[in-house]
Image (cartoon, helix red, strand yellow):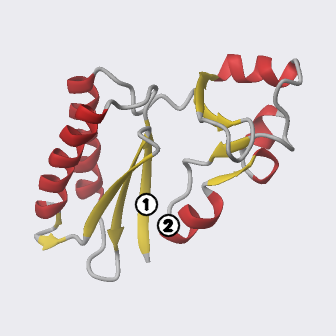
Amino acid sequence: MKRVWIYQSNRFFLQDEIRKIEQVLQEFVAQWTAHGNQLAGSFEIRYDLFIVLMVDEEKAMVTGCSIDKSVHLLKKIEQALEVSLFDRLQIAFRRAANEPIQVVPQNVFRSLLAKDEVNSDTVVVFNNMVTSAEELATKWEVPMKASWHSKVFL
């Protein structure tokens, strides 16, 4: 199984920042280990907003220490780029499937719902709680009514 962690930025990355992130993450996954075992790590930057870290656990299992190493690295990226990658109160969504992604604080998202500017039928949200590559492919970018967002916001 390929395990996944998704880190959403509070703003879109600039192209220069993406190159820096890619360089740092490439070096990191090349030497990412768990109890001395090389992890089959990889990463993606999606929509210039999300950093997706992945590990193929069929090759080697991640451990608490190896996860801590990745979190420590992402906190360094956060500081270097002056972004927030751990603010779970930022909601990324699209008003419709082909619309641009917007990132707003949770209270603004609630306000948009209250004004019916967005609703569970038209909003596509990003479920950053997915934990596997399979879920990433099928349950990450979904209508709000199919995500945990519907339980929290509706």
For the residue pair 106 and 19, the one nearer the viewer reads as 19
Q: Secondary structure at mark 2?
A: loop
- x 16%, y 45%: residue: 24
For the residue pair 86 and 61, the one nearer the viewer reads as 86
Mark 1 — residue?
4
Residue projecting furthest to the front: 98
Estimate the x, y position of residue 146 in percent, counting from the top left: 78, 54
Which residue type carries mark 1? Answer: Val
- x 29%, y 35%: residue: 15
The Cα–Cα distance between marks 1 and 2, rounded to whole angstroms, is 5 Å
Mark 2 — residue?
132
For the residue pair 42 and 70, the one nearer the viewer reads as 42
Estimate the x, y position of residue 148 in percent, counting from the top left: 72, 47
Closer to the chain start, of discs 1 and 2, is 1
Q: Tell me the quarter of the image containing the C terminus.
A: top right
Proximity of marks 1 and 2: CB atoms separated by less than 8 Å: yes
Answer left or right for 64 relative to 91.
Answer: left
Which residue type carries mark 2? Answer: Ser
Q: Quadrant of residue 121?
A: top right
